[in-house]
Image (cartoon, rainbow, N blue to C red):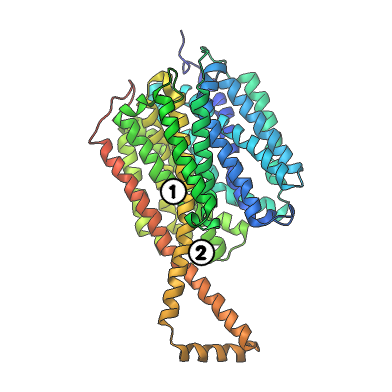
Amino acid sequence: MAKSWEISSKERALFTFIVMLGAFMAILDTTVVDVIVPKLTGPLSTDLYGVQWIITSYMVSAAIALLVTEYLIKRFGSKAVYIAGISLFWSASLICGLSNDLSTIIIARIVQGFGEALIMVTSHIMVFSYFPPDKQGLAMGIFALGVSFAPALGPTIGGYLTEYYNWRMVFFINVPIGILLTLAALLYLPKDRELKKLPFNFVSFVLISIATISLLIMLSKGQQRGWFGDELIGTLLFVSIISFLLYGLSELHSRHRLIDFSLFQNPDFTNGILIYFFILGFSMYQYFYLLPIYYEHIKMLPTLDAGIAVFAFALFIGIFSPVAGIMSDKIGAKKTVAIAAVIYIFSALFILPSLNYYTPLHQAMLLTVPFGIGMGMFFAPVTVLLLQSAPSDKGELAIVLMDYFRFVGGSFGTAIATNNMEYFKAMHHLRMNELQEYATINDFIESFMEQTFSTLSQAKVAFENYELFMSYNYGFYNTFMHAGFWGLFGSLFVITLFIFKGKALQGSKG
């Protein structure tokens, strides 16, 4: 039987383009929507906490959909599931763009999140299958070019669309692309050769879904509700822990398990997942969240200009993703991961924390370049490592687990960044008040009143706002550093790759 990669170069290029465009669209839409969400409070007649459900509902739905994707692929084939994902995605985008109320958009975003999960897993698997074993690093480099480049490009496109058009265009732009992709996939993508009728463990799926939903909502709403001082957050944590435990018991006593944990018997796979979980989720996701905030709220740039500033490191993500893929084929995935980790940790601990209000914009953009290089070199070798350390019939499950840990780890990372920003802002504000000389402050306020013709109360409010801003500014140093510490912790698992060596599949390199 012919192998899936035994196709012509033109077919490989066409198939890869169709699949990659879908993945790029799905990932790009996520970050573009993140940019516009704060601007929807007026059009949707709600508050900031209400519109945050537009993000939370999508994230929760995508995470749950991941858990059923392996079953769907084996039952119906990657092509069919990919087309279903694209169709759900653009249809839900159309509904979001036409909607005028929050509840309709949230329902549509749930559908859209489900579609995104189907797209990401199937596109990952299909791109990997189109390349021979000695070119699989290049395959993941090409995939990483889209998946890593899209989140960083999102703020630029989101800023442009909202500034020159309106928020609905963020959703409408997916519709023509999605329709064309659906037709192209139907006409050109190859059919799956083997399909299997597998039993589905519904009990385990329900339990892990409840656990995941509770955990992700807890992380999303924790800062808003005061974490464990709030009864709902405590309840969500309790439900999540109990559901995960019940899920474990269900899997132990099931003939047909939802997830085959034998994959974790391979040290390379286990370390690869932990690297992905901590370096990407706990650390890199913090910077993806923090850098646009830094440009908008510390450098006080308009949304579009902030997006252009973010594009500085996004460009290098795009350049170095295929470079890392080629390196994975030449020197091996493990060595490439190690090089990426060194570059990333150096930039996270010694470069990014230096960013503050006083940093000139051009300098700030240059200082984020090493981060872009490290990010670009990270994704491809980790993915190659995971897929090559999993049996060939477990490739779908390997991708599902990788994306699941990306969602959960990224949710932890965003929650940690949000909490740290507030904590360190309050800490620096308190410290500034402790060190103030009131005579000097009074002289400053009197001078401010004379120069601006303001009242005493207005001058005090202005000074308090200045204090809060500078507390925010100084707090970014600590927040950036803590994000780097999580990356440093994740790099321990890079070291263990070379200590506890797993058995990789034929065609992999150390």
Marks 1 and 2, how far apart at CA:
21 Å
Label 1 packing within 10 angstroms: few (<14), some (14-19), many (20+): many
Q: Measured from the top left, where is residue 115 in percent x and y?
A: 61, 32
What's the mark number on residue 64? none
Say which amino acid is labelled 2. Answer: Leu
Label 2 packing within 10 angstroms: few (<14), some (14-19), many (20+): some
Residue bearing mark 1? 284
Residue in view at x 56 percent, y 47 percent: 153
- Disc tally is 2
Q: Measured from the top left, where is residue 194 in percent x and y?
A: 51, 12
Say which amino acid is labelled 1. Answer: Met
Q: Is residue 55 above or below residue 6?
A: below
Discs 1/2, front: 1
Q: Residue furthest left?
A: 499
Q: CB atoms at circles 1 and 2 under 8 Å apart?
A: no
| Left or right side of 29 for 372 | left
| Left or right side of 59 for 390 | left
Q: Is residue 419 above or below residue 429?
A: above
**Res. 355 in view:** no
| Left or right side of 96 for 392 | left
| Left or right side of 409 for 507 | left
**Res. 239 in view:** yes
Q: Measured from the top left, where is residue 282 in percent x and y?
A: 42, 48
Specify the quadrant of the image occupied by residue 305: bottom right
Q: Is residue 173 above or below residue 191?
A: below
Asked whether 195 or 31 is in front, the reply is 195
Residue bearing mark 2? 361
Q: Measured from the top left, where is residue 473 in percent x and y?
A: 48, 68
Please tell me whether mark 1 sits on a helix, a strand or a loop.
helix
